[in-house]
């Protein structure tokens, strides 16, 4: 099978690049949220440890 329209390949490449960029953005946002949540848990644990003493 051959592409009858050579522009289809360019369109598919653009879609692929767009999807990759979206996934990278989503992953970075998730990482930031996870890091912030971890920092909050550490702060809570430190506060609890101080109260226990």
Image (spheres, rainbow, N blue to C red):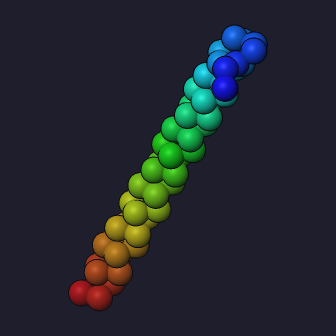
Quarter placement of the C terminus: bottom left
Extreme residue toward the front, this view: 1
Residue positioned 34% across, 75% down in the render = 45
Q: Answer above or below: position of 32 versus 17.
A: below
Is 49 left, or right, of 10 in this rendering?
left
* Residue at the far right in the pictured view: 5
Whole-percent x and y of residue 12?
66, 25
Residue 10, percent across and down? 65, 15
* Of the pair 41 and 23, the residue shown nearer to us: 23
Q: Along the line of sight, which residue is nearer the eye, 17 or 10?
A: 10
Q: Is residue 3 visible?
A: yes
- Could you tell me if residue 25 is visible in this image? no
Report the number of discs: 0
- Location of residue 33 in the rendering, given as x and y in whole percent from the top left corner: 51, 54
Q: Could you say where residue 40 lies in the image, as x and y percent from the top left?
A: 43, 64
Q: Residue 43's image quarter?
A: bottom left
Q: Is residue 53 above or below residue 2?
A: below
Judging depth in this view, the residue of 4 and 41 nearest the camera is: 4
């Amino acid at each position: 099978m051959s592409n009858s329209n050579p522009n289809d390949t360019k369109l598919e490449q653009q879609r692929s690049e767009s999807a990759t960029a979206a996934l990278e953005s989503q992953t970075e946002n998730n990482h930031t949220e996870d890091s912030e949540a971890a920092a909050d848990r550490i702060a809570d644990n430190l506060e609890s440890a101080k109260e226990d003493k």
